[in-house]
Image: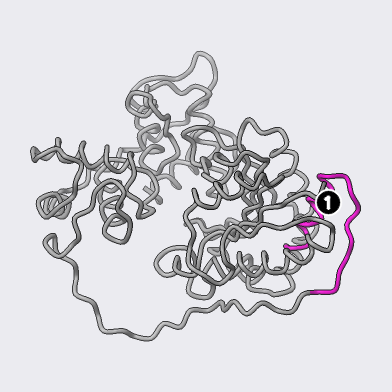
Amino acid sequence: MTKLIALDAGHGKNTYPPSKGVPKMPEFSFNSAVVGYAKPLFEANGFDVLLTQPLDGNDVALRTRTNEANGKKADLFLSFHADYTSNKGARGHWGFYWHTSKNGKKLADIWHDEVAKVRGDNRRNNQASKPGAWTNFHVVRETNMPAVLMEHGFMSNAEDLALLLDDDYRRKCAEAACRAVCRYFGQPYKSVKPAPKTGVKDEVATPAPAKPKKPTPSSRATVRRGSRGADVRYVQQRLNTLGFNVGTADGIFGPKTEAGVKAFQKARGIGVDGIVGPQTYGELAKANPKPKPSLPNVVLRANRPYPSGANVRAVQESLASVHFYPEKGARNNGVDGVYGPKTADAVRRFQSVHGLTTDGVYGPKTRAKLAEVM
């Protein structure tokens, strides 16, 4: 029976601006170009292909994409992306899979091997997604088949960006994905004639528009659970800044955003209804963020007996403030003042993303990077 492969071009053309991409390259242009080159390769190698969203259209909701792949009983789900980080030195490729999926890990490992050949380096990372962790991606969590979210390089790094913009690299990334799937199913890869260059444009024209008026509390739309858009994103950003952590500011008003709004309303002594209207907007605008946690100038590592106390708590709170120390459902996000394996793992993930030695030790370099990004 022919295998069905879901090819997911991460993000649509309406996602940059405001967020997914850089001026030289909206992320959707890379993702769509690679999927456009990959589709005929997969078909030539005997696979059926499901495109989860149009290659030059607006973003399709994540749930819609995974529901379609599940409903059509796809055999594999591949989500194509390019990465971004505040650490301009970060380079390389990442593959994310759900933490209980042995076949997801198998596919990610094979894909890493193929992309390393394309890149000509060994900057490879592999990250299982754990509940509540920063790698908790919808497309690997909600799919019924093995799924890998693939980051092919960092748009924030000049060398990686040059690769991501290069049409030859995009074609090779498409081929690497197809080769990986062929290896996964134990069949030989069949080369085919290169597809024509995609028509997806990269650089975004930036004419100087008339400067928009700054929104006021009364001019913003009332938002509540189920709302979407720029005003929801503003609410999420303000709540995160003020210490009411609602996760990624994705412009979707879900249960976590509603809980954050209610907690903020309660803290400000106003009506607690989870709805953001003029009064709540006004309080969001004038509220001052909590002071940043003070970073201790010590060295901490998870050796028994585990270090504990105020210094450890400050490190945990600092990691939580940049979303590397969440523990869903735990009291205070799991901040307990004990530097055990859980805290060492959070430090390692922070170090990995920011190009530091991933030893799980809180020391001078990790302290300096935390101070920079908080």
Q: Nearer the viewer, residue 280 or 275?
A: 275
Which residue sits furthest top? 305
Q: Nearer the viewer, residue 140 or 214?
A: 140
> Left of 283 or right of it: where is 359?
right
Residue 187 belongs to magenta span? yes
Secondary structure of residue under mark 1:
helix
Amino acid type of disc 1? Cys
Q: Nearer the viewer, residue 23 or 298?
A: 23
Which percent across, then down, holds residue 178? 78, 57
Residue displayed at 54% across by 31% down: 345
Residue displayed at 13% across by 53% down: 286
Residue 190 belongs to magenta span? yes
- The vertical placement of 263 against 176, above or below, is above
- The vertical placement of 293 against 62, above or below, is above
Residue displayed at 22% across by 46% down: 289
Q: Which residues are magenta?
A: 174-194
Which percent across, then down, holds residue 162? 63, 72
Which percent across, then down, holds residue 251? 35, 55
Q: Nearer the viewer, residue 370 or 108?
A: 108
> Left of 232 or right of it: where is 341?
right
Pointer 1: residues within 10 angstroms few (<14), some, or many (20+)? some
- The vertical placement of 249 against 14, above or below, is above
Quadrant position of residue 161? bottom right
> Left of 143 or right of it: where is 61?
left
- The vertical placement of 354 against 80, above or below, is above
Quickly name the residue at label 1: 182
